[in-house]
Image (cartoon, rainbow, N blue to C red):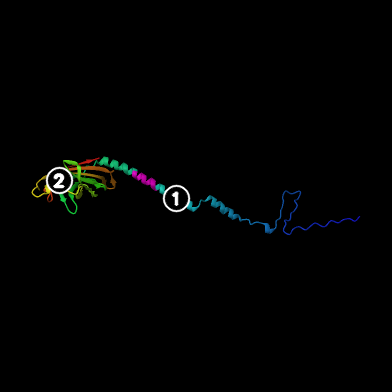
Amino acid sequence: MEERVLPPPPPPPPHSPKLQLPDINSDTYVVQVPKDQIYRVPPPQNARIAELHRQTPPKDTNRSRCCWCWVFFIIIFIAIVIIVGAILGGLFSEVLKPKDPKFSIQRFHLQSKPHKQYDITLQAHNPNSKVGISYKEGGSASLSLKKQKNNNIGSGSYPTFYQPHDDSTVFDVTLKSAKPDFPKVVQESMAKGKSKTHVVFSLAIHVEAQIKMWLFQSGTMKYDVACQVTVVGLDKTARLVSQECETKRH
């Protein structure tokens, strides 16, 4: 019987890894891989750069934190200044105990054209020898007849100005008529032949002010001024017969 011969084994693929059998007496195994199957390995310095990035926060984050710190610091600073200013203002008022300003009417005049209004010239006197008075915006003035105190016949605003210590300031207040015509008693006094009729008016002023000395200032104080004035001769610039003004602080 003829003996069959087995064909030789096929050759290995050209790119297949060549395996080296491990040495029985060695614990190390070596695997050889073709060059075209080896992936790129980053250099060691790249690992160091990545580690530095993980440890060091980005500059933008630092800048944002710095900005928020400044904003927080400014808010705290403003709050402290306001609180300290309020405390010092209260102590400032208590220590100095400033006197209230005094008012008097210098001139009383009625105007018919172009609008009916009352033009009053006032004088404010600051009796304090060390502090000034700063009158703030929002002050008001109103005029009524003595026998009709709740019937407002004219209203206007109080001017804003600063008054130094021991100073007397003259200023004007314009009160527009609350009605198209002057009150009947005023019209009668303006009529020819009746210019000697006495008319009594009540002037009310509401104003807020602060006491100031150097860089210190008090808290806001409210003043109510009530003046009662008797005038005659409303056909022209009225002549003041008598007056009495009182200032109250709240």
Q: Which residue is mark 2?
A: 184
The amino acid type, in three-letter code, at marker 2 is Lys
Q: Quadrant of the C terminus?
A: top left
> Does residue 76 show up magenta in the picture?
yes
Q: Quarter of the image containing the N terminus?
A: bottom right
Q: Label 1 crowding class (10 Å Cα cut-off): few <14, some 14-19, many 20+?
A: few
Residue at 31% over, 43% down:
86
Of tags 1 and 2, the one toward the viewer is 2
Q: What is the x, y in percent for residue 59?
A: 49, 53
- Which residue in the protein does label 1 denote? 66
Residue 239 at least partly seen: no
Checking the image for residue 99, the label placed there is none
Q: Residue at horizontal 13%, vertical 48%?
A: 187
x and y, in percent, of residue 19 in the image = 74, 54
Q: Amino acid at mark 1?
A: Cys
Q: Is residue 79 visible?
A: yes
Q: Which residues are magenta?
A: 74-82
Q: Is residue 152 magenta?
A: no
The residue under the point 50% across, 52% down is: 58
Task: Name the N-terminal-most of marks 1 and 2.
Answer: 1
Residue 92: image location, x then y, percent: 28, 42
**Of the pair 219 and 154, the residue shown nearer to us:** 154
Instruction: Look at the numbered discs 1 and 2 and tell me whether their residues touch, using CB distance below 8 Å.
Output: no
x, y percent for residue 243: 14, 43
Q: Residue at x 44, y 50 (%)?
A: 66
Residue sitting nearer the eye, 220 or 54: 220
- Judging from the image, what secondary structure is the residue with disc 1 in? helix
Q: Please say if 37 is above or below 158.
A: below
The answer to which of 190 and 173 lies nearer the viewer is: 190
The residue at the far right in this view is 1
Q: CA distance from mark 1 to mark 2?
A: 72 Å
